Amino acid sequence: MPHRLFAAAVEMGGLQGSAARGEASVLEAEAGLFPPGVKAAVFDVVGTLVDPSPSVAVAYQQAARRHGVEVAVAELAPRFGAAWTRQEAIDAVLQPAHSTSRERELQRWYAIVRDVFAGLADSDTTDAIFQDLWQHFALPTAWQATAHGPELVAAALEAGLQVALASNFDERLFEVAAAVEPLVQAAHVFPSSELGWRKPAAAFFRAVEARLGMRSDELVMFGDNPELDIAAARRAGWHAVLLPAKGSS
């Protein structure tokens, strides 16, 4: 019987392989989530296997409050979205595009926090809030499994596949992945800061292939972002499964 999440992915048109080759069609994969010939399931992390707990906006509110700044979640959420989008645009025009490092990821998050609290806190307070948040999101207690995360990883393992994490994250992912289910089930952890590239760069996917010692057609990417996880993986020749968005039926 097909995996329960397979039906949801098919309904969304998410279970597809390389668009160029037309591989991993629904008919090829109707026995489960994993196309024939696939040797490893590679998972995005945030939004796919785990979510922040509390939410990002609430975590920012709580960090600000610890430093004497009161601001509503309803104000922080759009500020965070705008700050995130600005950094994505900056990454896209870097030379080379979407290249990264531990230093760049630290700089990226520092800029996001400063943008979020611009006009709400002075420079020293914002720096303190940044340090607070950097440490917070390194804690396993800041994360919880998504509704479908454990089931997805279990299905991959039951199918005899290697399980890897590949995320636009930094070195903090190692600590989180060592303690939070279902991340602990992964044999390989690839934060973008260690690969030197962020999704959607083709080099991100090539770096994962090299570290796993596998070809593109032997890998399937699971993610919740249609562009960064799915379209980018397909352009790299991977199979890809778009997962139902949070809160969808």
Image (spheres, rainbow, N blue to C red):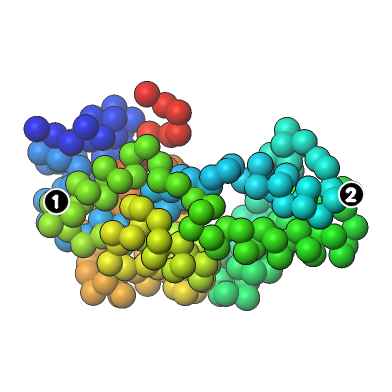
Indicate the amino acid at tag 1: Glu
| Residue 91 in the image, given as x and y percentages of width and height | 61, 62
Indicate the amino acid at tag 2: Gly
Label 2 residue SS: loop
Where the N terminus falls, by quadrant?
A: top left
| Residue 58 in the image, given as x and y percentages of width and height | 66, 42
**Going by the image, does 175 lie left or right of 32?**
right
Please give the name of the residue rendered at 40% of the width and 45% of the height, measured from the top-left corner: 145
Label 1: few (<14), some or many (≥20) within 10 Å?
Answer: few
Rendering quarter of residue 188 = bottom left
Residue 131 appears anywhere in the view: yes
Rendering quarter of residue 219 = bottom left
Residue labelled with disc 2 = 119
Task: Please tell me which of labels 1 and 2 falls first in the chain.
Answer: 2
Please give the name of the residue rendered at 71% of the width and 65% of the height, measured from the top-left corner: 131
**Going by the image, does 104 lie left or right of 4?**
right
| Residue 147 in the image, given as x and y percentages of width and height | 37, 37
User: Can you say whether 14 is above or below 19 in the image?
Assistant: above
Residue labelled with disc 1 = 158
| Residue 22 in the image, given as x and y percentages of width and height | 22, 45
